[in-house]
Amino acid sequence: MKVGYVALIGRPNAGKSTLINKLLGEKVAIISDKPQTTRTSILGIKTTEKGQIIFLDNPGIHKPLHGLNKRMMNFVFSSLETSDLVCLLIDTTLRFGHGDQFVLDSLKDLKIPVILLINKVDIIKKDKILPQIDKYNKLYPFKEIIPISALRGTNVDILEEKIFENLPEAEKMYSDDEVSIQSQKFLLSEIIREKVLHHVREELPFVTATFIDTIEDRPDAKDGRAGKFIQARIFVEKDNQRKIIIGRRGSLIKTIGTEARKEIEHILDAKVYLDLQVRVKDKWRDSANVLDLIENQ
Ligand code: GDP
Ligand code: MG
């Protein structure tokens, strides 16, 4: 069997969550067109007859700027050290910048094979792809360079094949049906955060964090069907942001709650009562307490 850890890295919005979802065929990572929606590394597992790939989905690599980004950097590099292979995902529609160079420089020291994935090739002209491959070939000794469309699934099968080729021989580490071992609370909190971001993307790009306080069994009073009572908190930095999320007479928080509840009901296959509270926590991004809360749930 081929078994190993694969770190998936790339700038925010490169398409990491989309690719993970396509590879695993299940919603394990939150997708948003706002950067930095993935803050905690998410472990997804792909098991086939060839073996087992354990994916580490990483927050985008940034130069450390404030508390959150320093921690994000630690996640990125701690997961790289335990990886057998790195998949570096780039967005073909963006220019190669300082940040990308910084990533390549960091990778050079690691001595782990790197596969470069040129993503979103569905939105560029075909004749633009080969010159890009040439350019990246000169920049770094990549093990492979694969143009892909994470969204459409183009070349994702080839990627899977190449990943297996580059993994060591080992015994499986997880049972065949384990797709993701992230906690259920984390998954649910990410669903709520995704709904918030979809509605307030312009006003508050990076200031929301969500946290599940309670999940309790509560059968439906009428028909006795399985039910869950879930309490969650949405953190923002300022009172005006709290007001935006709540909306006029609570209209927006109601919409967010309904959308999140429907999706959670689908996942848990139970009737859900969702109680959402919006809390102001000044500078939560630098607060180790809140970060611990989110990461350890
Ligand atoms: P992440 O921040 O790296 O996890 O990026 P996401 O997976 O959340 O994707 C960011 C945005 O890019 C979303 O709007 C995706 O739909 C879009 N996207 C991802 N992959 C592709 C692709 O192959 N083609 C196109 N056209 N869009 C993509
Ligand atoms: Mg993501």
Image (cartoon, helix red, strand yellow):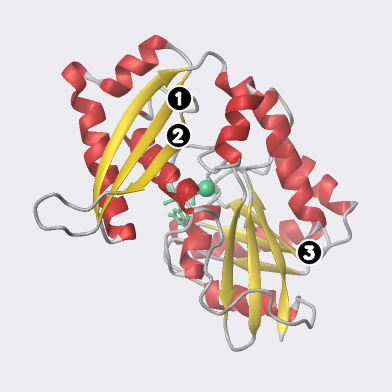
Looking at the image, which residue is at 75% across and 40% down? Answer: 74
- Given the image, on which type of amino acid does mark 2 rest? Thr
Q: Residue furthest top?
A: 239
Using the image as rendered, state which of residue 26 and residue 115 is in the foreground: 26
On the image, the x and y values in percent for residue 47 come to 58, 78
Q: Secondary structure at mark 1?
A: strand
Q: Residue at x 65, y 72 (%)?
A: 53
Q: Residue 175 — which label?
A: none
How far apart marks 1 and 3 lie (CA) works out to 41 Å
Reply above or below: 107 against 207.
Answer: below
Q: Position of residue 286 (x, y in %)?
A: 64, 21
**In the orientation shown, which residue stands out farthest toward the left?**
222
Mark 2 to mark 3 CA distance (whole Å): 38 Å
Element type at marker 2? strand
- Judging by the rendered image, the residue that carries numbered circle 2 is 210
- Horizontal side of residue 156 vs 9, given as left or right: left
Residue 175 is situated, as x and y percent measured from the top left of the image, at 59, 77
User: Badge 3: few (under 14), some or many (20 or more) residues near its Cα, within 10 Å?
Assistant: some
Q: Residue at x 48, y 24 (%)?
A: 207
- Report the side of 3 relative to 89 (left or right): right
From the viewer's perspective, tell me whether residue 27 is left or right of residue 106. Answer: left
User: Which residue is the site of mark 1?
Assistant: 235
What residue does disc 3 label? 142
Going by the numbered disc 3, the residue's amino acid type is Phe
Within 10 Å of disc 1 (Cα), the crowding (few <14, some 14-19, many 20+) is: many
Q: Is residue 203 visible?
A: no
Count of labels shown? Answer: 3
Relative to residue 242, is residue 76 depicted above or below? below
Are the residues at dot 1 and dot 2 in contact (C-beta closer than 8 Å)?
Answer: yes
Assign the C terminus to one quadrant of the image.
top right
